[in-house]
Image (tube, rainbow, N blue to C red):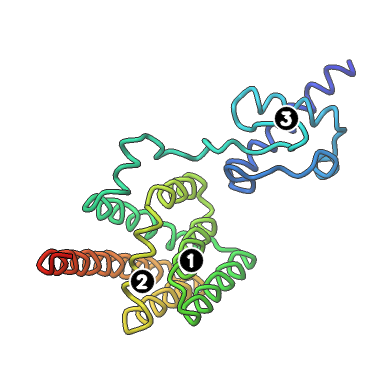
Amino acid sequence: MAGVRQQRMSDRVVEELERAIVEGIYPARERLPPERALAAELGVSRPTLREALNKLAVRGLIESRQGGGHRVKASLGSAFSDPLLELLGKHEGFEYDILEYRQALEGMAAGFAAERATQEDRARLTACFERIERAHASGDAGQEAEADAAFHLCIAEASHNVVLLHNMKALFQLLSASIADSIFTFAGQGERGVSLLAQHRALLEGILAGDAAASRSASDHHLGYVAQCLSESRRADERKVRSRRRSGV
């Protein structure tokens, strides 16, 4: 009977860890807490925890390394991992299709976040926006691009829709970092940079106010502007290339 009880207990632990993975508490590549701490958190013995971890490893959800603990597999959440789809994020023109799809997803995420965000979600969103402000003030385009991505993923988390969240994470992996960097490098600290910051502020304020319609509108306006900035950046690059050709450089 003891063996049966342990079996049932390990199944319960498997269910709890699976839910934590699905909800993004332990995202892809994330290391799980040490066994002693995780067993205490779940209220089970270490043998029971190890049995559950073995089941998760067999299912391909985690990987275990000798002396390296347990980690959620990197392949999880890679809904857009097909090599053909990866090319979409690297070649000019296709990124506009990605941005269009992202615009649809993020509009939903913003609306849901306005309706569902908890006090903790609102605090995290505010902290993410303040990170964007600091990056903008520093003039570091790379930091601002990273802060921007973190802010939008935080909105997806605040939507409390795990399918939407995982799709958003996959999209951000697909959308090349160079695209985000080029937008912020091109926008710089001039009027475009100020506009991007104001758009993020409007998006945050809509969610904090619980106004779903305003949040969706702010998201649509922001991503439409991002697409416009990207288009202008591409045209500026083309002009530079033509100029160098004429100069024989």
Splitting the image into 4 quarters, where does residue 218 fall?
Answer: bottom left
Q: Residue at x 35, y 54 (%)?
A: 102
Q: Say how many tags the image has.
A: 3
Residue with the mark numbered 3: 53
Residue with the mark numbered 1: 114
Q: CA distance from mark 3 to mark 1?
A: 36 Å
Q: CA distance from mark 3 to mark 2?
A: 45 Å
Closest to the observer, 69 or 76? 69
Query: Which amino acid, by three-letter code, is at mark 1?
Result: Ala
Give the mark, 1 or 2, whose residue is nearer the N terminus. Answer: 1
Q: Is residue 203 left or right of residue 122?
A: left
Give the mark, 3 or 2, whose residue is nearer the N terminus. Answer: 3
- Residue 220 placement (x, y as % from top left): 32, 65
Q: Is residue 94 left or right of residue 175?
A: left
Q: Residue at x 37, y 75 (%)?
A: 196
Q: Residue at x 32, y 39 (%)?
A: 85
- Residue 148 placement (x, y as % from top left): 46, 66
Instruction: Give the foreground label among 1 and 2.
Output: 2
Splitting the image into 4 quarters, where does residue 237 fall?
Answer: bottom left
Query: Which amino acid, by three-letter code, is at mark 3?
Result: Leu
Give the class, few, some or many, for how many residues have Cα within 10 Å of label 3's Cα (few <14, many ≥20).
many
Q: Secondary structure at mark 3?
A: helix
Q: CA distance from mark 1 to mark 2?
A: 30 Å
Give the class, few, some or many, for how many residues have Cα within 10 Å of label 2's Cα (few <14, many ≥20).
some
Instruction: Give the foreground label among 3 and 2.
Output: 2
Q: Secondary structure at mark 2?
A: helix
Where does the N terminus fall, quadrant-wise?
A: top right
Residue with the mark numbered 2: 185
In the image, farthest residue toward the right: 2
